[in-house]
Amino acid sequence: MRQIIILAGSLLVSGVLAAHVIDQAARRQAPPPAATALAAVPPERNSPPGSVTIQRDPHGYFLVAARVDGRRMSFMLDTGASRVVLRQSDASMLGIHPFARDFNIEVTTANGVTRAAKVELGVVEIDGLTVRNVAALVSQDQAALSENLLGLSFLSRLRSFTYREGRMVLEQ
């Protein structure tokens, strides 16, 4: 039994290290999403009322400019993130300054493990779609999160979010 546990632990560590190496290699080949966020294709204006269509960028990301409590911020849509996640510097621009003791949630990202603090955002808006009182996290260190994430705490409060023909369609 002990050997099985040791083997399983070794495989887990090997998998995490391999994922980290692959992620770092991919980062060297493509600019991080943050570098292209403001240059992302804006939502399509021919979307029906109550709907926003977001084109995938050349690197395969869905980047969008949003307003959080009235301030413009860039996000990457991430249906795998359970919450909206802000980098600490972006949270600071909103006047959100968690204490060190508030970073008590361990979060696993594609870039590694980091600590985060729970917060609530008053209003998150994307081109007319508005969600109030959005649960979010503030990521403790910017090295583990290269872009703010627009996760399910926002997306699940919409009527629907679907992927169609290389586009993400958000409907309220």
Image: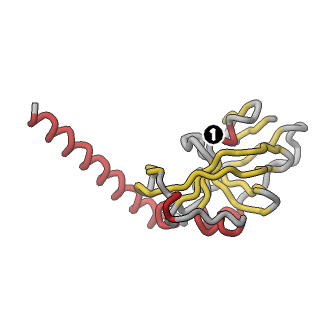
In front: 107, or 148?
107
Q: Residue 103, percent across and down? A: 50, 58
What residue lies at 46% left-to-right and 51% top-to-bottom?
Answer: 109
- Looking at the picture, how far across and down is residue 2, in whole percent? 10, 35
- 26 relative position to 71: left or right: left
Look at 73% across and 31% down and name the residue there. Answer: 160
Residue 129 appears left or right of 146: right
Q: Which residue is mark 1?
A: 152
Instruction: Give x and y (percent) for residue 141.
Output: 49, 65
Q: Assign the N terminus to one quadrant of the image.
A: top left
Please state which of residues 96 and 65 is positioned toward the viewer in this rendering: 96
Q: Nearer the viewer, residue 97 or 112?
A: 97
**SS class, disc 1:** helix
Q: Is residue 121 left or right of residue 51?
A: left
Image-based side of 30 in relation to 167, left or right: left
* Circle 1 Cα neighbour tier, 10 Å, few/some/many (<14 / 14–19 / ≥20): many
Res 78 quadrant in image: top right
Circle count:
1
Q: Quadrant of residue 7?
A: top left
Figure coloring: secondary structure
Quarter that holds the C terminus: top right
Q: Is residue 9 above or below residue 87?
A: above
Residue 76, given in percent of the width and then of the height, sits at 63, 53
Specify the amino acid type for callout 1.
Answer: Leu
The residue depicted at 72 percent of the width and 61 percent of the height is: 73
Whether 5 is drawn above or below 15: the answer is above
Residue 61, visible in the rendered structure: no
- Report if residue 169 is visible in the image: yes
Q: Residue furthest right?
A: 49
Frontmost residue, 111 versus 102: 102
